[in-house]
Amino acid sequence: MTGEKGNKLARVIPEASLGDKLATEPKLDNVSQKRIGDQLRAMYDELMQQPVPDRFKDLLEQLEKSDKEKAK
């Protein structure tokens, strides 16, 4: 038994055969957009409630200090 899996090449579709299929930008309907937005908010809400780590605050302070010194 020979392993043919993974040896298949991607098929190239000539642009001319696509016709007007790509003429308009793909869009999601409002229901799908809302569902995706709700799911993303639910996933990241907990993360957004967490405080900024002290290490990040220190790095931001160093960047601000560096910017002020360069502006002189």
Image (cartoon, helix red, strand yellow):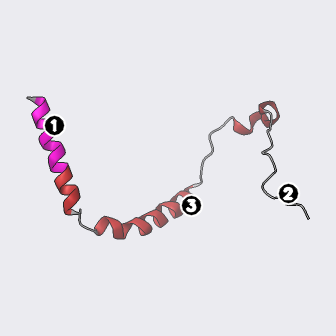
Name the residue carrying label 1: 67
Q: Give the alpha-carbon distance from disc 1 to disc 3, as whole Å.
A: 45 Å
Q: Amino acid at mark 2?
A: Glu
Instruction: Tell me if mark 3 has few (under 14), some (14-19) or many (20+) residues whose alpha carbon lies within 10 angstroms of its own.
Output: few
The kind of residue tagged 3 is Val
The image quarter in which residue 17 lies: top right
Q: Compare residues 62 and 13 and report the one nearer the observer.
A: 62
> Viewer-nearest of labels 3 and 2?
2
Q: Are marks 1 and 3 in contact (CB under 8 Å)?
A: no
Camera-side residue of 18 and 34: 18
Q: Find the magenta span and give its range.
A: 60-71
Secondary structure under tag 2 reads loop
First in sequence, mark 3 or 2: give its number: 2
Q: Give the spatial CA distance, label 2 vs label 1.
A: 58 Å
Contact between marks 2 and 1 (CB within 8 A): the answer is no
Q: Could you tell me which residue is drawn at 11 percent across and 36 percent down?
A: 68
Name the spot of residue 53 as percent of width and height, x first: 23, 63
Mark 1: amino acid: Asp
Question: Residue 66, located in which quarter of the rendered image?
Answer: top left
Q: Position of residue 42 (x, y in %)?
A: 43, 69
**Residue beneath label 2, please?**
4
Q: Residue at x 79, y 39 (%)?
A: 12
Q: Magenta segment, principal secondary structure?
A: helix
Asked which secondary structure carries label 3, the reply is: helix
Residue 44 higher or lower than 29, as above or below: below
Count neighbours of disc 2 (C-alpha within 10 A) and say few if under 14, some if 14 to 19, many if 20 or more: few
Q: Going by the image, does 14 lie left or right of 47?
A: right
For residue 65, which quarter of the picture? Answer: top left
Q: Residue furthest right?
A: 1
Residue 43, image x, y percentages: 44, 68
